């Protein structure tokens, strides 16, 4: 993986020589990487490393959190499964439960009582 300075130098080297094979050897990357960076420079004007698009995306988005908060305020006795069904949320019960706790709401488990 090339850092941002090397990416800029690679693009400049290609623009001067127009020899992707030679530039690829010098920077120890594939020719496809050279062509990809040149294409990225033409389309966006920059060739910086995009670190913000990495990793797993959050399942409950900010909009989902807002909807969950509004639903819990309107129906305080709703269950986690009820929230998932009403809002048609992706993810599992645990994900929604953590979102509810993050919003500062309290949920109660059904209490099992032993009959005497």
Image (cartoon, helix red, strand yellow):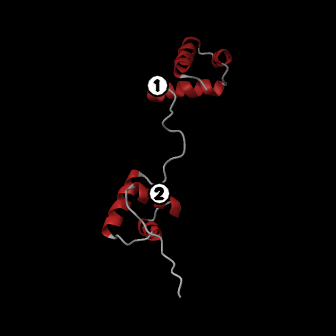
* Element type at mark 2: helix
Q: Residues within 10 Å of mark 2 (few under 14, many from 20)?
A: few
Q: Is residue 78 above or below residue 26?
A: below
In depth, the one of 47 and 21 nearer the eye is 47
In depth, the one of 33 and 112 nearer the eye is 112
Identify the residue position indicated by label 2 in the image. 98
Tag on residue 114?
none
* Element type at mark 1: loop
Q: Is residue 69 above or below residue 41?
A: below
Residue 76, percent from left and from top: 35, 70
Q: Is residue 111 above or below residue 22?
A: below
- Which-is-in-front pick, marks 1 and 2? 2
In depth, the one of 101 and 7 nearer the eye is 101
Identify which residue is drawn at 46% across, 25% down: 46
Identify the residue position indicated by label 1 in the image. 46
Identify which residue is drawn at 55% across, 22% down: 3
Mark sitting earlier along the chain (1/2): 1
Q: Is residue 105 left or right of residue 17?
A: left
Residue 69, percent from left and from top: 35, 60
- Furthest toward the top, the residue is 16
- Furthest toward the left, the residue is 74
Task: Judge whether residue 91 can be spotted in this image.
Answer: no
Q: Is residue 101 left or right of residue 7?
A: left
Residue 87, percent from left and from top: 41, 65
- Evaluate if marks 1 and 2 touch, with contact meaning CB atoms under 8 Å apart: no
Q: Residues within 10 Å of mark 1 (few under 14, many from 20)?
A: some
What is the total number of numbered labels drawn onto the structure image? 2
- Furthest toward the front, the residue is 116
CA separation, marks 1 and 2?
39 Å
- Furthest toward the bottom, the residue is 116
Identify which residue is drawn at 53% across, 39% down: 54
């Amino acid at each position: 993986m090339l850092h941002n300075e090397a990416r800029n130098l690679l693009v400049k080297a290609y623009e001067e020589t127009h020899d992707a094979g030679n530039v690829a050897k010098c920077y120890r990357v594939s020719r496809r990487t050279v062509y990809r960076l040149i294409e990225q420079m033409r389309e966006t004007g920059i060739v910086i490393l995009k670190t913000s698009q990495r990793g797993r995306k959050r399942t409950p988005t900010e909009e989902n959190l807002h909807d969950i908060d509004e639903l819990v305020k309107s129906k305080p006795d709703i269950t986690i499964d009820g929230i998932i069904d009403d809002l048609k949320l992706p993810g599992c019960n645990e994900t929604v439960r953590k979102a509810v706790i993050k919003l500062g709401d309290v949920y109660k488990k059904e209490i099992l009582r032993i009959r005497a």
